[in-house]
Image: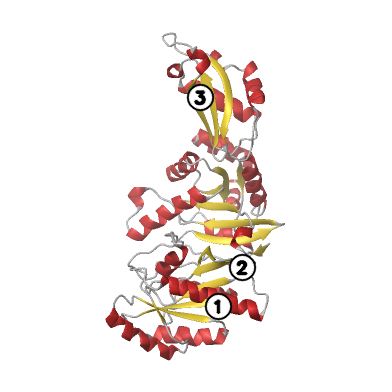
Amino acid sequence: MKNHSGIPTICIVGRPNVGKSSLFNCLLKEKRAVVVEQSGTTRDRVEAVIHLNRFSAKIVDTGGYVSKDKDELSLQIKDQIYRAMEEASIILMVTDTAAGISASDEEIALLLRKFSKPVILAANKTDNDMLENDSLEFYQLGFGKPEQISCLHRKGIRSIRKRILESIEDLMKEAPVPGVAAEQESRYLKIAVVGRPNVGKSSFVNNLLARDRVIVSAIPGTTRDSIDTYFSYEGDEYILIDTAGIRHKRKIKAAVDVYSVMRSRESIKRADVVILLLDAPDGVTKDDIDILRFVEDNGKACLVLVNKWDLAEKADDVSVESYEKHLVYAFSHLAKFPISFISSKTGKNVLASLQMAKVLDANLDLKVSTPFLNRIFEKKDPSAVPIPRSRKRPNFLYMVQSSSRPMEFKYFVNDPASVLPAHLSFIENNLRDNLPLKGIPVKVLIRKSRKAER
C-alpha cells in the first residue's frame, strides 16, 4: 500500500485562526474544511485535489501550530504538521495581517527554512487599503513579498493560484516532479468511514494505511473534519474519508460540532461505499441506526464493521455467529448488509475490509436484463402476497431496472394505489435472494402500466 504520490502536494501551515481552512476552501472552490471563529478547529490534516490549468495538485490543510502547548493532543497536531511539511512539494504559509507578526509566525518561518522547500507567503485578512501597508511587515520572515489576500472577500485568491502554478512549473523544470493532467486523473474508489464518536474510526484508518495518518485520541470528537487520504493498493486507487463522529442532535452543543456532523453527512453523499463502524462492547445503538438509515436513504453501498472485537471476545467469550444474530435481532435491517468483525488495535480483518468494499462498489454497477428480472418473479408472483380481504389485489405485469448508483427498479402494475408495503418488502427480498445486492440499498418504484390503461 502506498500514498497517492502522482501529483505535487501543497501544504498550508500557520498558527491557529489565521484563516488556513478558509484559504483551503477558497482554493478548492467549495466548503470542505470546517471554518468557525474558534481557534484550533482543524486538528487533523484535510486533503483534496485542485486543478490548475493542465496540472492537478493535492492541497493539504493542517492544524494550527502553537509552540507553547505541550499536551498530548497538541503534540500529535504538531507531529501531523511536521509530516505534512515533509511530504509537501510547496508550502503555503498563512499569516494574519490584522494581528501582525507573532512569535509563532517566526518559529514556523524558522522551521520552514530547515525544509528548504518553495514557500508562498499569504497575508490573510488584508481587507482594505490601510491594511495593505501593514502586510509588508511580513517581508522580515524571509520569504519575499507576501501575497495580500482576504478569504472573507475572496481577494487575491487568483494571484495565489497563479503563484502555485508557477511554483509547480519551476519544479517541473528542475526534475520530473509529479504533475498529472487533470483529464487523465484516475478514477478513485471513495470510501467514507463513519460512525458514532469514539468507535475507533481514526484507528481503523491508521491501521489500514499502516501509518499514523490521522490523530487518534481517547477524547470523543477528536476528528472535526472529513479527511481525504489518497492511496493505492494492489493496483487500485482509493480515497479514504475519515469523518467526524455523527451523534444525535440532542447531544450536539458546540457550533463546530454542528458543522462537523454536516461535513460527515456530505462525505456520505459523495462516497461510493460507506464503512459503518460499530462498537462491539456497545452493540447497535439508536445513533448507529440513524446513520445506517441516512446511508440507505442516499443509496450508498455499506459495509458494517464491528470494531473492538478483541475486547468483546475476551470479556464475554461470545462467537461471531451468536453476536451477529444478536445484532440482527436488535435491528433487523442489519440483515441486508455484510457484517465483518475487526480490531483496529490488532489489525484483525482490517485489510480484508478493503476487498469487501471493492466488491460492493462493483455490485453497484450491476445491470440486470428485463427478461431475467421477470423470470425471477414468474415463480414468486407478488400478487400472491396475503392482503386484507377489503383491499383490491394488484396485478403485477413486468419489471425493469431503471438505474444503478443508486440501485433502482420499476415494477409496472395495473393499479399502483393497491400496492401495499408488504408487496414492496416481498419484491425487495426476492431481488436480494437472486442478485448480489447485499449491502446495496434497493429502491422499488411502482408505476402504472400503459397496457393496463388500454
The residue positioned farthest toward the front in the image shown: 53
Look at the image and tell me in which quarter the N terminus lies. bottom right
Q: In which quarter of the image is residue 258?
A: bottom left
Q: Which residue is drawn at 41% across and 53% down?
A: 261
Residue 376 position (above or below residue 323):
above
Report how far apart the C-alphas of labels 2 and 3 lie in the structure.
48 Å
x then y, percent, for residue 156 = 40, 73
Residue 350 at least partly seen: yes
The reply to whether the C-beta atoms of the residues labelled 2 and 3 are less than 8 Å apart is no
Q: Which comes sooner in the sequence, label 2 or label 3?
A: 2
- Residue 167 numbered tag: 1
Q: Circle 2 is placed at which residue position? A: 7
In this orientation, does residue 385 appear? no
Mark 1: secondary structure: helix
Residue 254 or residue 272, whichever sits in front: 272
Number of residues whose C-alpha sits closer than 10 Å to that of mark 2, classed few (under 14), some (14–19) or many (20 or more): some
* Amino acid residing under circle 3: Leu
Disc 3 is placed on an element classified as helix
Q: Which labelled disc corresponds to residue 444? A: none
Task: Name the residue type under label 1.
Answer: Ser
Q: In this view, does 115 lie above or below 281?
A: below
Which residue position holds label 3?
Answer: 424
Marks 2 and 1, how far apart at CA: 13 Å
